[in-house]
Image (spheres, helix red, strand yellow):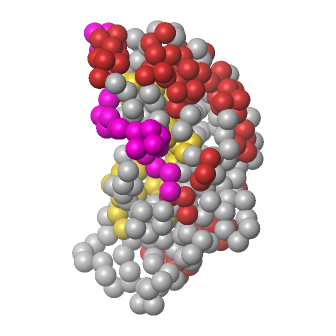
Amino acid sequence: MTIDHLTTLHGLPVHDFPAEGEESGPPPPAGEVAWRLSRNPLRADEEPFETCWHRFLDTVDPAQVRALVLGMGAYGSEDDVGDPAGTTDRLVAAAGRLTGLEALYLADLTFEEAELSWIVQGDITPVLSAYPRLLELGVRGSNGGDGEPGLRLSPLRHEHLRTLRLENGGLPGEVTRSLAASDLPALRRLDLWLGEEYYGCSTTLADLAPLLDGDRLPALRHLGLQNSEMQDEIAAAVAGAPVVARLAFLHLGLGTLSDVGAEALLGGQPLTHLQELDLHHHFLSEPMMRRLREALEPAGVKVVLDGREQPREDERRYVAAGE
């Protein structure tokens, strides 16, 4: 699976903050684009990310900025220069200036810049605490560097967050448990890429159970539990999960879903209330794909079954994004 740079965030087109002297024409209004800040630390002719960051705050009216995307320089792999702790400190320090920030995406790096499992992350709790009116947060990667634990989250209450997306080759169980213990009354969309144990996934079905109960997610309408090597087990758990009855969108793709998991979905609670069931990147048979369509499409459910995969020679199924 190819992971590309973001092109939109929070409904706004992503616009690269240019190097000094490179802007051709007037910049867009600060609140009409998602500003992307990225500097390659391995190129001697590029300004350091910290210089770019301060120049951005002094050039663009920070109070009008609604969406921000941070790439290379702010984040990197174990082998390349990236400073997630320093980036967190910068974001927290700038909270009094970025007063209109509604959406934030941390570590917009492609495979060419850093494999998903290599991206070094840190504690995202201070960022959420510093921006209590943030509506959308996306985080790519979960690795640790120099002995650090990697992606972390402490249980918290956030009144306004509507969308949370964690894209991982391996989602730590500690993060999932903290998320399940958090109060997120406004959260409408939750997307979790679980990944593989080899790349750091320690999330279990027991960790996911409170999320599937949905008691602390009263506004949830879109749930994605994806990119997992235990996708059949997740499908079986979802089949009886209380939260499903109030969902409009259910995404269980990108992982190792087989006929076993699909059978559990068909045999569980009704899914005909959904607007969309997305299972793309799967290992379903043609007859099972037909059964899913026949059961759900007449009720108006959009069933996404693109990306039918074949097991490897050793019959092993695989997730879309591990390394």
Residue 18 location in percent, x, y? 36, 75
Seen at 32% across and 69% down, the residue is: 27
Residue 150 location in percent, x, y? 67, 59
Look at the magenta stretch and give its main secondary structure: loop
Q: Is residue 197 above or below residue 190?
A: below
User: As rendered, which of 315 and 247 lies closer to the eye?
Assistant: 315
Q: Is residue 143 above or below residue 279?
A: below
User: As rendered, which of 296 and 276 lies closer to the eye?
Assistant: 296
* Magenta stretch encompasses residue 303: yes
Q: Quadrant of residue 303?
A: top left
For this orientation, the residue located farthest to the front is 314
Seen at 44% across and 69% down, the residue is: 113
* Magenta stretch encompasses residue 166: no
User: As rendered, which of 171 and 283 lies closer to the eye?
Assistant: 283
Residue 54 location in percent, x, y? 54, 77
Seen at 57% across and 46% down, the residue is: 196
Residue 13 location in percent, x, y? 33, 54
Q: How many marks?
A: 0
Seen at 41% across and 18% down, the residue is: 274
Say whether residue 254 is visible. Answer: no
Q: Is residue 169 above or below residue 70?
A: above
Horizontal side of residue 50 vs 12, given as left or right? right
Q: Which region of the structure is painted magenta? A: 297-323
Say whether residue 275 is visible. Answer: yes
For this orientation, the residue located farthest to the left is 25
Q: Quadrant of residue 290?
A: top left
